[in-house]
Amino acid sequence: MSNGPIHPPKSPGLAAVLSALWCGLGQIYNGQIGKGIAFMIIQFINALLMFIIIGFITYPIMWIWGMVDAYRQAEQMNLRSTTVDD
């Protein structure tokens, strides 16, 4: 019997795809609302930075980081939930 609430497993692939569509959406899918909103705000700032060229570097870096982070966090959440249940 587990002590915490039961969470359905998260799909790492879906989390990564959601972050590919909109940076931060994968984090929100994973339940990391604050982190997802922060990613969205940072990406908005990166879009504005495109007017001074540096955004062309920071925007894709943040986009890729968001996808990788969403994927890894979903995997870790699933691993933690299976470890707790055992």
Image: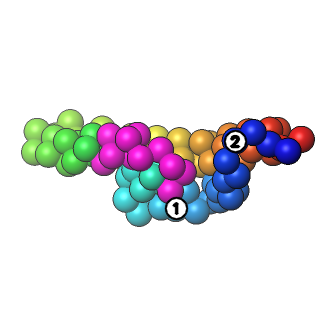
Q: Residue at x 74, y 44 (%)?
A: 81
Circle 1 is placed at which residue position? 17
Other residues around mark 1 within 10 Å, as few (<14) / some (14–19) / many (≥20): some
Mark 2: which secondary structure?
Answer: loop
Residue 35 in the magenta stretch? The answer is yes
State the colouring used for the structure image.
rainbow
Q: Residue at x 58, y 62 (%)?
A: 14
Q: Amino acid at mark 2?
A: Gly
Q: Which residues are magenta?
A: 29-40
Residue 62 placement (x, y as % from top left): 38, 41
Q: Residue at x 80, y 38 (%)?
A: 84
User: Looking at this view, is 75 or 34 the one in front?
Assistant: 34
Specify the quadrant that holds the N terminus.
Answer: top right
Q: Amino acid at mark 1?
A: Val
Residue 24 placement (x, y as % from top left): 40, 50
Circle 2 is placed at which residue position? 4
- Residue furthest right in the image: 86
Residue 85 placement (x, y as % from top left): 83, 44
79 relative position to 37: left or right:
right
Residue 34: quadrant of the picture? top left
Q: Residue at x 38, y 52 (%)?
A: 23
Residue 81 in the magenta stretch? The answer is no
Other residues around mark 2 within 10 Å, as few (<14) / some (14–19) / many (≥20): few
Instruction: Estimate the spatial distance between the alpha carbons at disc 2 and disc 1, rounded to whole Å.
Output: 28 Å
Disc 2 or 1, which lies upstream in sequence?
2
